[in-house]
Image: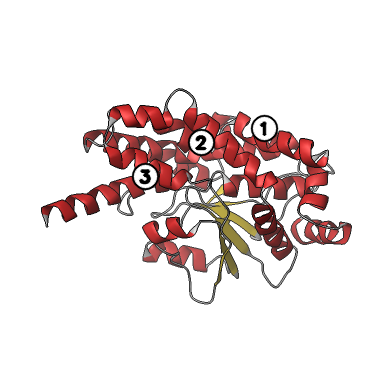
Amino acid sequence: MRAVHIRRATGVVVSAVVLGCLPVCAATDATAQSAATGSLNAAGHTDSVRHIALQGAVNVRDLGGYRTDKGRQVRYGQVLRADALGRLTDADISKLSALDLRTVVDFRVPFEVQRDGTDHLPAGVTAVSRSVNDLGLYGRTMEAIGSKDPVEQQALLGDGKAEQLMRDIYRTFVTSPESRRRFAETLRDLANHKQTPLLYHCTSGKDRTGWMSYLLLRAVGVPDETAEKDYLLSNDFRAEADRRSREGLRKAGLMENPDLLVPLQEVREDYLAAALEQAEHDYGSLHGYLTEGLGLDTPTLAKLRARLVK
């Protein structure tokens, strides 16, 4: 019984760090509270960002407010991005209910859902499972932490291996036919008024969700620099939760050097660049990736802009 208890306890801690969010009982940090009011000036970001402060998730945002290259604005209340929603409290559910969500798309693979649980959603919301391959990132991280072996952890994640894995994951967003199909289906849903308001998420709300958000913003005419800033904002919203997770692993004796996880917990410009370079290589441009790679024709892209931009 003791061995079983230890394995279960280890699994809970490991799941917490891979999920990358604070326990439900922990309040959102000061950065998130500030962002919830639309104030991110200290970080050099736009006031238009609307963060949704929840107890069970830290990286939930409305993609509205961004300006396009034509001076128009992405509508608030139509598209939301998030991290995993399996730890939402009753108060969180009430807050999401007020957003009138119709659809929630989950990009997690089955193993992630099995370990962290299904989403807790308001009544009446349609939940869509649309898993996008993470190249075993979740399982590899669980394996490294669960080993409790500093040498094995260094071998698995150190010396640039974690960074290389992240770049490889981003390239598969372009090269994998199944991943392209999942992203395309979600963009088509966003163009359909019967599916919106729509929220999509993965585990940490930063990689699969970050790429989806970057694609969406670029597709409706938001400049590259602005879309990249939205992508990088995950580092601001996740920083304290991720720091606490690493400290928890150190105190639990699971990792001697939990900073090995930092490249897996962060988003970085070169990760995004890896996907964009792959799109350029395979399809000539990001537009080619959207049209040829994802199969989005001109009428669909026009409908997407009409639905989401005012």
Place of residue 91 in the rendered image (x, y in percent of width and height, measured from the top left): 39, 63
Task: Looking at the picture, tell me which residue is in the foreground, 201 or 57.
Answer: 201
Question: Of the numbered discs in the image, which one, if any, rests on residue 273?
Answer: 1
Which numbered disc, 1 or 3, marks the residue that appears first in the sequence? 3
Instruction: Identify whether 88 is placed above or below 162.
Output: below
Which numbered disc, 3 or 2, marks the residue that appears first in the sequence? 3
Instruction: Identify whether 209 is placed above or below 43.
Output: below
Question: Of the numbered discs in the image, which one, if any, rests on residue 235?
Answer: 2
Which residue occupies the extreme bottom position in the image? 124
Contact, mark 3 vs mark 2 (Cβ under 8 Å): no
Q: CA distance from mark 1 to mark 2?
A: 17 Å
Which residue bears the numbered disc 3? 142
Contact, mark 1 vs mark 3 (Cβ under 8 Å): no
Place of residue 83 in the rendered image (x, y in percent of width and height, measured from the top left): 49, 52
Task: Looking at the picture, tell me which residue is in the foreground, 293 or 46.
Answer: 293
Look at 65% across and 50% down and name the residue there: 212
Q: In terms of secondary structure, where does tag 3 sit? A: helix
Instruction: Give the residue type that dot 3 points to.
Output: Met
Mark nearer the viewer, 1 or 2: 1
